[in-house]
Amino acid sequence: MNAPLSAYALKPWLAQYGTHIAADLATPVHASLPALASAAAARYATQTAFTCVMPNGMYGSLSYAEVDEMSDAFARYLRGTLKLNAGDRVAVQMPNCLSYPVVLLGILKAGCVAVNTNPLYTPTEMAHQFNDSGARVVVIVDMFADKMAEVLPKTSVQHVVLTRVPEFFPAVVGPIVYGVMKYWNKLIPSANLNAVRLPDALAQGRAVGGEAKSYWGGLKHSDLALLQYTGGTTGVAKGAMLSHGNLLWNLSQMRAMCASHIDDGKEVVLTALPLYHIFAFTVNFLSMFDAGARNILVPSPRPIQNLQRAIENYKITWLTGVNTLYNALLNEEWFTAYPPKHIKAAGGGGAAMHRAVVERWEKVVGAPLVEGYGLTETSPVVCFQPLNGGRELDTIGIPAPMTEVRLVDDDGRDVPLGQPGELCVRGPQVMGGYWQRQEETDKVLKDGWLYTGDVAVMSAQGTFKIVDRKKDMILVSGFNVYPNEIEDALAKHAGVMEAAVIGVPDNKTGEAVRAYVVKAQDTVSAEDLLVHCRSLLTAYKVPAKIEFRDELPKTPIGKILRKDLRAQVLAQLKSK
């Protein structure tokens, strides 16, 4: 007699699809991302694809046809001028700007692999990612190029391409924006760097001639498209291998769930989240390019006033963000007094959305703000709340089509309905593994299932809610921060004997990084350690507070117990 199917195998969430979401999806029609991009460019050639908006409202735009031609030229530069081979890695280190889609699509059209890199990384972090990925080329914005002089000798990077935030702006506007950034705001440091300017690289690529399709015409779903770095379960940065198929399937899954709210060729999406992050990369960049949308790029959403001109000057229909971004907008008089009325929907992820923020947003804006869940390892979308029908707040919604989700105990057995268990995912969007790290891959990929380390519960209707994290990861404004990395940085200081890092609740960033240190030298101060951390870590990873203790909680064998420390700290905070 066959055993009854578990609650997860029955997929109760399918009943919530209704008539708005297709449960079964056909294999994506395109064999690769360049094929999808070229088809979109042909379909929407004369329409504006990207508009980069500065805080003062000055802007530059590129049409679909221009992005297509420029990315073709960059592909020919990589393959014809620099003589890269198919599969070679090219790192991209820039904020949201017009150069990003040109370069990113150019890398993919060259048959190469893109390595998204946070432009705020320190030289130490940059060197690790470039070396680990084996990047031969780095495309970097001039605002951060001064770090490359220190980094290059420590890597095997052979070529550097330099770009600017106002690249491809109109001839009169671009120099003004550049002058303000360099001489007034002093955002562009001097850099003694042997690099090629992006416009010159494009000119060299055009001189190569031929069709870029000769480089990408043979790409398949199984070919690697992206190395997207993440701390995974240990905090050691490693590249999630995302194939063309992973990303194409995730686009199809998202389009299926959002079909009722997307009108191809007519959407205007606000992209405040960084495109180098997998959330904005797939949701804002790839999916909206496929939909023929106009993408409004904001180089930096901080301070939040940087979004004002973009929101006021363009009829935004879609936007994505994290809880802190939506909360900040709702505390701006210019936004609440004259809220945008063209918005069809907004998406939240990266960290839990607060109910009060969602309810206020929907009251002020009059459009749904749906919460989702995903990981770098899943390209990223796994679940989100449906845009039609009833949806339950304080949840991550339901699995996307063609996605299986189950909750398991520590032995890998399905837990009963309503009980918490580790969330496991199986679907065509799940990565192939971590780049050159088989041991780490085997820890999270088991029998085709990705073990996420997040603990969730499922309702009888198939709606999921995250209740805890098995990992010690800290979420700061939607960015993953891993205690191991910060503890390692602290341990490099001679004044530190022991260190433990945890996350504590924070009204502004969701969670804040807090470090607890046992001194090795009595004279060391918290400020000494903060200065040390700033030299090694990106700003959002630097502890918000450092406290000294005589000892830290440990196991009998001497392993520091973060969970005990966290419990102590949270109890202290609660008692205040």
Image (cartoon, rainbow, N blue to C red):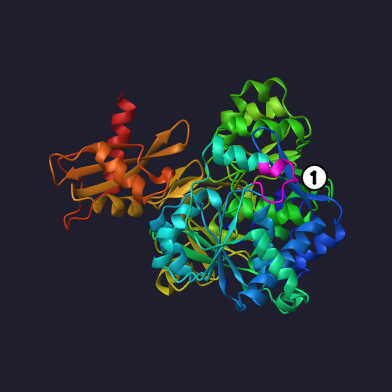
- Position of 546 with respect to 66 (left or right) is left
Residue at left offset 70%, top offset 45%: 386
Q: Amino acid at mark 1?
A: Glu
Q: Magenta stretch containing residue 167, yes or no?
A: yes
- Position of 113 with respect to 569 (left or right) is right
Q: Position of residue 503 (x, y in %)?
A: 37, 42
Quadrant containing the C terminus in the rendered view? top left
Residue at left offset 54%, top offset 36%: 185
The image shows residue 202, relative to residue 47, as above or below, that is below
Magenta residues, as a range? Answer: 166-175
Crowd tier of the residue under label 1, counting other residues whose Cα lies within 10 Å: few below 14, some 14–19, many 20 or above = many
Q: Position of residue 322 (x, y in %)?
A: 57, 40
Q: Position of residue 418 (x, y in %)?
A: 52, 48
- Can you see residue 265? yes
Q: Residue 396: which quarter of the image?
A: top right
Q: Magenta stretch containing residue 382, yes or no?
A: no
Q: What residue is shown with label 1?
A: 267
Residue at left offset 73%, top offset 75%: 208
Quadrant containing the N terminus in the rendered view? bottom right
Q: Nearer the viewer, residue 364 or 291?
A: 291
Q: Nearer the viewer, residue 152 or 455?
A: 152
The image shows residue 220, relative to residue 516, as above or below, that is below
Residue at left offset 61%, top offset 50%: 164
For the stretch drawn in magenta, the main secondary structure is loop
- Can you see residue 409? no
Q: Nearer the viewer, residue 218 or 390?
A: 218
Residue found at the far left of this picture? 522
The image shows residue 449, relative to residue 484, as above or below, that is below
